[in-house]
Image (cartoon, rainbow, N blue to C red):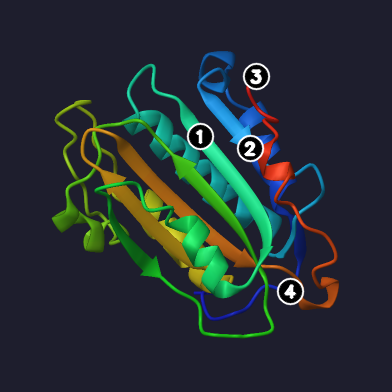
Amino acid sequence: MNEHVTPTARSDFGAAIQEIVESLPPSKQKRIKVIAPQKPLWIIGDWDEIQQIVTNLIDNALKYGGDDGIVRIVVSGWQDRETALRLAMREWQGGARLPLTTPEVEHDLLYCTLRVEDQGPGIARQHLPRLSERFYRIEETATGKSGTGLGLAIVKHIVNRHRGGLVVESVLGKGTAFSVYLPHPAELGSNWSDEAALQQDLGTP
């Protein structure tokens, strides 16, 4: 009902991710590797809905990434729309990739990107366009697990409301990555670069 109501609140994307990761059981935390800047990454977003995005993507990656697979989370900020989309789809060799929703072009906006990668069996190319449909499910023969088909539909709804983008990239036998990119508050501008910070591993519990 609120998908067309643009949020006005400000949230620290990095803090939301850290809070969700720290709330997981230690056995799951050990499987997660976070690469993110140490500075706050403010975005236009409702805190509860931002946490819902992070929770759903991490839960999916842990569930379908195998019992011992590492979940890699990469966060970066202050990119224009084209750069954010490029970071969301890092072009794994031989990968299939598809934007599931994209924001309207607003040249003055900068974006923060979250990419969540698993090491699961991957998803066949023909399934990608339907992944964010409600109740659409894929039986994962390699893991024997299937979900409700609602998690990614909820993520897409929230991303649309926040005027952001959602991207999937997958390689059979290698894994799947889901990425979202959400706008920074326009008034903050870009006064620092986080390229070096992206090399820092902040989350191998």
Gap between marks 4 and 1 measured at Cα: 30 Å
Gap between marks 3 and 4 measured at Cα: 33 Å
Q: Nearer the viewer, residue 144 or 99?
A: 99
Q: Is residue 74 left or right of residue 98?
A: right
Residue shown at 49% from the left, 71% from the top: 160
Q: Quadrant of residue 204?
A: top right
In the rendered image of this protein, does residue 110 appear above or below residue 98?
below
The residue at which mark 1 appears reads as 72
Residue type at mark 3: give it: Pro
Q: Are marks 2 and 1 in contact (CB under 8 Å)?
A: yes
Q: Is residue 75 left or right of residue 11?
A: left
Tell me the crowding category of disc 1: few under 14, some 14 to 19, or many 20 or more residues within 10 angstroms, Cα based. Answer: many
Residue 189 visible from this viewpoint: yes
Residue type at mark 1: give it: Arg
Residue shown at 45% from the left, 74% from the top: 102
* Badge nearest the viewer, 2 or 3: 2
The residue at which mark 3 appears reads as 205
In the rendered image of this protein, does residue 205 appear above or below residue 122?
above
The residue at which mark 4 appears reads as 8
